[in-house]
Amino acid sequence: MDEAIAAKNNTLRGEGRIPLFVPGGGHNAPPPGPPPGPGVFSPHNEPMEPRVSALEARLDTLVPNLATKSDLAELKTDMHKGFSEMTKWIVGSAVAGMAVFITVMTFVLNNAVPKVPAATPAQQAPVIINLPAAPAPVVPTQTPSK
């Protein structure tokens, strides 16, 4: 079974589809050889004690500079305050911008186009209504009484 997997890896490596990880180097590093014997250290298997002590020394210099919970809480409060102030400014600026836009557009639309006086229709002749003359009033005649 190991031979089948190795053959598949070699086939895939040859086709260049899968870059295989080679410990201690990039893709161009030679494949690892047999493990070193007892007491023999390869360049990638040096003693761990100096490396760990160097890392501990670096951590000892970094830890005092890390943020504490109180620092993070203060930062959170400051950021919240800053965001709320920024939101107020953005909304205020948007309202002011819209007011300026409406004012400018009103001025432009009212004054940019010359006003043509409305054409007054020609004065029509007055309508004259002629009424027939009123008939003479009828006076009742009196008849002699007896």
Image: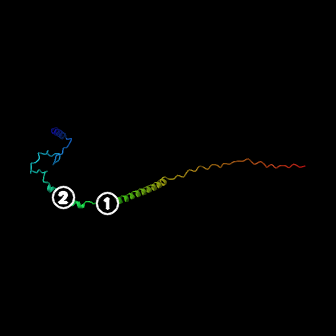
- Above or below, 89 relative to 24: below
Say what secondary structure mark 1 lies in.
helix
Q: Residue furthest right?
A: 146
**Mark 2 vs mark 1, CA separation in Å:** 28 Å
- Above or below, 63 relative to 40: below
The label shown at residue 125 is: none
**Mark 1 sits on what residue?**
73
- The residue under the point 21% across, 61% down is 61
Q: Nearer the viewer, residue 75 or 39?
A: 39
Looking at the picture, the colour scheme in use is rainbow
- The residue under the point 31% across, 60% down is 73
Residue 132 screen position, x and y as percent:
73, 47
Q: Earlier in the sequence, mark 2 or mark 1?
A: 2
- The residue under the point 34% across, 60% down is 77
In the picture, residue 3 is in which quadrant?
top left
Q: Residues within 10 Å of mark 2 (few under 14, many from 20)?
A: few
**Mark 2 sits on what residue?**
56
Residue 42 screen position, x and y as percent:
11, 50
Q: Amino acid at mark 1?
A: Ala
Placement of the N terminus among the 4 image quadrants = top left
Q: Amino acid at mark 2?
A: Glu
